[in-house]
Amino acid sequence: MIVKDLKDLNFLTSVRFFVYVTLIILIFFNFLDIFLFELSRSFPGLIFNFFKEVIDPISDILDPLNFIILFSLILFVNLNVKSILNDKKKFSVIKDKTNYSREKIEDLFIYISLVSKHFIFSLALAGIICNILKYIFGVTRPKYFFLEGYERFNFFNFEHKISSFPSGHTQAAFTLALLFIIYFRRYFFIIILIATMMGLSRIFMSMHFPSDLVAGAYLGSIIPILFYDKFFKKKIEKIKKKHKFSLIDLFKLMYWRIFI
């Protein structure tokens, strides 16, 4: 499946879709969460091992903090791009190695900075909102609900055992997923599949109920789209209309930026 136009994703930020998601969460929370969680306990051990040994380590690698650090470093490295481009010798090296015009080089550095900021702001804000909601709702994690007799929810609580809703891992997975879909649309199915598996792993790790995953996925999905439409879309689309370039071109440019 390919998302040809980001307008295909705008339904995610609509009021109607918010209402649908809210109703789904309420239905799961009140009628299906406990049943589905208990049902998952009957699954073969092979499935549990798959999520523990394969999917959970992927979640650690795709930790939002890793991406925030990475893109912050990219922004830091590009702080003095103008002075480098004004240095005739250094600019000559970049131009010779990439075969790009000065205008294209400047625009691609701007593009890299815009994408970096989009990742940083989306991941940071989504994470902050998710943790605020965890504190407000105070929903108990499954293993403490079943094994230690905690109440289903306890509003305004900082305790880790009572911070199940929304799922932070699922929120992070879908924030990253939507960010990658925005810039690599042809890989939509693979990206969503990985994000979904990362979310489902939280049930098999006894950390979340299904309603937590729905809320986390929704929150994680809307923040990148809202940020893109409001702050980045016009500038990024303008650059993409002016120049044809690929991910390899961006890597090449950053490589010579670092090593000249």
Image: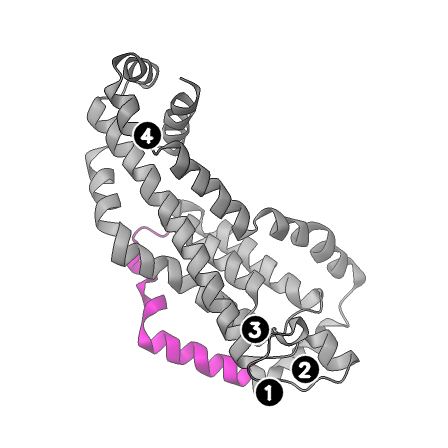
Mark positioned earlier in the residue sequence (2 or 3): 2
The residue where tag 4 is placed is: 80
For residue 70, side relative to residue 31 (left or right)? left
For residue 33, side relative to residue 226 (left or right)? right
| Image position, residue 77 (x, y; %) | 40, 32
Circles 1 and 2: CB atoms closer than 8 Å: yes
Q: Which amino acid does label 3 sit on?
A: Asp
**Residue at 61% across, 83% down:** 32
Q: Does the magenta stretch include residue 26?
A: yes
Q: What residue type is labelled 2?
A: Phe
Q: Does the magenta stretch include residue 188?
A: no
Disc number placed over residue 212 in the picture, else none: 3
Q: Is residue 1 visible in the rendered structure shown here? A: no
Circles 4 and 3: CB atoms closer than 8 Å: no
What is the distance, in whole Å, between disc 1 and disc 2 at their CAs?
Answer: 8 Å
Of circles 4 and 1, which is in front?
Answer: 4
Q: What residue type is labelled 1?
A: Phe
The residue where tag 2 is placed is: 35
**Residue at 25% across, 14% down:** 88
Disc number placed over residue 249 in the picture, else none: none
The residue where tag 1 is placed is: 31
- Helix, strand or loop under label 2: helix
Query: Is 250 placed above or below 193 here?
Result: above
